[in-house]
Image (spheres, rainbow, N blue to C red):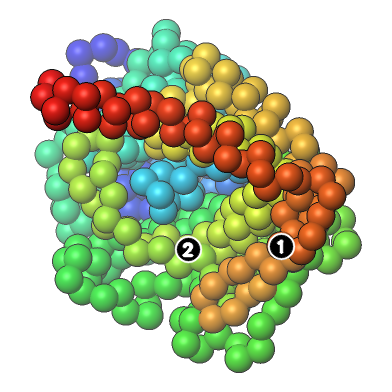
Amino acid sequence: MSKSVNKVVLAYSGGLDTSAIVPWLKENYDCEVVAFVADVGQGDDELIGVEEKAIASGASSCHIVDLKDKFAREVIYPTLKTGAIYEGQYLLGTALARPIIAEAQVAVARQVGADALAHGCTGKGNDQVRFESAFAALAPELTVIAPWREWHMRSRPQLLAYLAERNIPCSASATKIYSRDANLWHISTEGGELEDPWNEPTEQVWTWTVAPEQAPDQAEYLKLSFVRGELTLINDKPFEPVDAILHLNQIAGAHGVGRLDMVENRLVGMKSRGCYETPAGEVLYAALQGLESLVLDRTTQDYRIRLGNEFAQLMYDGRWFTPLKDIMLAAATKAAEPLTGDIVVKLYKGCVTVTQKRSPNSLYSNAFATFDEDDVYNQQHAEGFIRLYSLASRIRALHAHTDGGKE
């Protein structure tokens, strides 16, 4: 608190933490607080009354910015082309939303003439890095305030008592079983019984998906059509990105698709356990992988897989606003140019399976792959290929024989 600020824009959710941060900022920095709320598809229930809550907490104003379309078009769809999956499992639901939230927060700060930014991220998580890395890239001149790294409050009862002393209304209770984060792409759940990895998640953990055991006994098939790696049609009906994701979340979630229980490596060094629900994401990744298998040659597909792993790490680590991100997305966009075609997926009891695939750019040729007689492949040619392919092994073995096995 060494640097004085006049006006700060706070990333505000209306929850307990940010409700306490508003008066804390005013008291400790003697500044005006402007609340900023990002609508990234967390649900209308989360936004009802949020402006009134912010004003009641002491904010001078509240700016609600609809980022859903930008989130889908500029972050989710491009990332899908990279195939980014963190540690082979996590579809990056929380990490994907942070860059556009931070970018919009900076825009509001400039709009209102603020000289500081604040967030409610804890000192243990990844999000503090993601937000502050974005702030550094977009507005290095603005002061960044992270109350959880400064104040002495450490529990929900302490935060509630802090608000009660100031007669600030809050609907939160002293106990909170879970910590959840939702957006258009996913919902994550942490805390409660999940803090012990030996505990199986109870059904109250899951909110978007039904238990696979309770899913319909009849499978459902969806035809997904892609152009240059982007979804355009579902069952031959055109869908804009936001509507497509919402539609697939609903359909796939009803079949129990999209659940993940994972222990992951956080950027800050510790492991954490989370349960993630990403129904649309699981369907889209499966469909795109099916299309890639038909269209991409082996070396391009191998590179795309490596690119996906690296891009997942980049996104997880909060490095969206870097030259490397632009380079990697350019490569992924180029690799996705031939990804035009139709994929049929089967949704059944928590699983999504690609059952049919076709593309005008398909490299699959039945004339070459058939086990029946053909006129395009001379099997005798394979002998020369194998001799050249295994030449290094042959030379090594002959060398060892000549030298009696001595190096």
**339 or 248: nearer the viewer:** 339
What's the residue at 42%, 8% (across, down)?
A: 141
**159 or 344: nearer the viewer:** 344
Within-10-Å neighbours for mark 2: few <14, some 14–19, many 20+: many
**Image: 246 above or below 306:** below
Q: Amino acid at mark 2?
A: Glu
Within-10-Å neighbours for mark 1: few <14, some 14–19, many 20+: few
- Does 277 sit left or right of 296 as displayed? left
Q: Which residue is mark 2?
A: 277
Under circle 1, the secondary element is loop
Report the mark closest to the observer, 1 or 2: 1
**Image: 82 above or below 42:** above
What's the residue at 50%, 18% (across, down)?
A: 324
Where does residue 106 sit, x and y in percent of width and height?
52, 23
Q: Which residue is mark 1?
A: 371
What's the residue at 44%, 33% (across, down)?
A: 390
Where does residue 193 sit, x and y in percent of width and height?
22, 71
- Does 168 sit left or right of 320 as displayed? left
The span from disc 1 to disc 2 (Cα, nearest Å) is 42 Å
**60 or 264: nearer the viewer:** 264
**Image: 163 above or below 127:** below
Asked whether the residues under the numbered discs 1 and 2 touch, taking CB atoms below 8 Å apart as contact, a structural biologist would say: no
Under circle 2, the secondary element is strand
Where does residue 301 sit, x and y in percent of width and height?
59, 38
**202 or 147: nearer the viewer:** 202
Q: Amino acid at mark 1?
A: Phe
Q: Is residue 295 visible?
A: yes
Residue 278 — which label? none
The extreme top residue here reads 141
- Does 126 sit left or right of 285 as displayed? left
What's the residue at 72%, 54% (across, down)?
A: 369
